[in-house]
Image (cartoon, grey):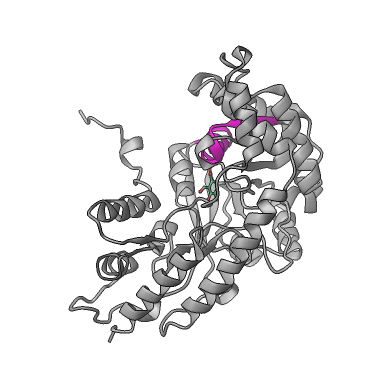
Amino acid sequence: RRRISARIASIKPSATLAVDAKAKELKAKGRPVIGFGAGQPDFPTPDYIVDAAAAAVRDRANHGYTAAAGLPELREAIAAKTKRDSGIELDASQVLVTNGGKQAVYSAFATLCDPGDEVLLLAPYWTTYPESIKLAGAVPVQVTADESTGYLATVEQLEAARTERTKVLLFNSPSNPTGAVYSREQVEAIGRWAYEHGIFVVTDEIYEHLVYDGVTAHSISAVVPELADTTVILNGVAKTYSMTGWRVGWMAGPTDIIKAASSYQSHLCGNVANVSQRAALAAVAGPLDAVEEMRVAFDSRRKKIVSLLSDIPGVECPTPEGAFYAYPSVKALLGKELRGVTPANTVELADLILEHAEVAVVPGEAFGTPGYFRFSYALAESDLVEGVSRVAKLLAEVH
Ligand code: PLP
């Protein structure tokens, strides 16, 4: 008999966390590693949120369980925030508070999918998506868009991948890892197509406020209101309020889906930490000033990193319009010699870069598209410049 179930044994460890771990190991040995791997803002959680949490922890009323679906006032605040930011009307009963956006992703597929159902997965994709789809027994069907279209998929591509088993389209704009943002017209075309074919949409909007160059992130069921009954919105406080460690996210959508997911959560983990929910309440019910400050800082780093990467021969870097990642193609550098090695893929090239330039980047294999690197620019601008300069210097040796 096997010790580990086939279902769990099939999960790949998170490649982004693996890169981070390798970089930390080298750092612990005293090597001056610069990490472009982390998917978290490098800013502290704003004081007013920390203060609300500190006050909450001292109040014994907050030491017990909450309702499994979350604090009623937090669910209300999330509904109000969804109206404010996306123009979508929700009742508090249409919101489930989860342990980070990550758990919302998993719960969405667990709730929507039966074994054999197909989920259209737009690649480059966030590394957690295929694993959570597979854990739900469903089948990820990859639809890939490359740098020639700014990593944006078309309805034609989706239609070519559609079968009678297609249950869900997973949509993520702004995207991790590419930073691509779909225009209103593109969102509308994709939304209409999904509606026409009765395909559910799971839309991950966790980077909604991190957009640049005057671009807006459009929520698909706001653009195509007919989709309201078949759309699940995923979001959370991690990126908007620099609260990655607090573990608060949510899923919002049709009442029956949220009710079913809440029953599941009541057995899985009960509720999200009471005090974290209080902190999230202060965040969600409060202003967006802090994210605007972060956005301005990220924007400056974005311009810097795109310009530095674009100067490296063999690197092609489309300008990302959202999130805090750049996703250049390095395909032209593969199969050539570098320091006595000929890397055949981006996992091997990333290893060489870590070893010889002491810079950590995440290879495209982690996002379903070998031939690319993801650079997170959630690090100090001085480190960013130093890190990319080291990469440029090393890659100049490729021949
Ligand atoms: N969705 C996307 C696209 C992400 O990049 C992340 C975090 O990296 C999440 C969801 C989930 O974030 P968390 O679980 O920290 O709320």
Q: Nearer the viewer, residue 157 or 62?
A: 62
**Position of 119 relative to 275 (above/below):** below
Q: Residue at x 71, y 59 (%)?
A: 187
Q: Give the image location of residue 392, x and y in percent.
A: 38, 78
The image quadrant where one finds the C terminus is bottom left
Q: Is residue 323 above or below residue 11?
A: below
Q: Is residue 84 left or right of residue 135?
A: right
Look at the image and tell me in which quarter the N terminus lies: top left
In the rendered image, residue 32, in percent from the top left (x then y), is placed at 30, 62
Residue 300 coordinates in the image, percent (x, y): 60, 68
- Number of marks in picture: 0
* Nearest the eye: 315 or 168: 315
For residue 6: magenta?
no
> Is residue 111 located in the magenta-colored stretch of the structure?
yes
Residue 297 appears in the picture as rendered:
yes
Q: Which residues are magenta?
A: 95-114
Does any portion of residue 210 appear in the rendered image?
no
Residue positioned 55% across, 77% down in the render: 148
User: Main SS type for the magenta part?
Assistant: helix
Q: Nearer the viewer, residue 118 or 328?
A: 328
Judging depth in this view, the residue of 251 and 121 nearest the camera is 251
Residue located at (26% from left, 51% from top): 28
Residue 10 at x, y = what percent? 33, 42
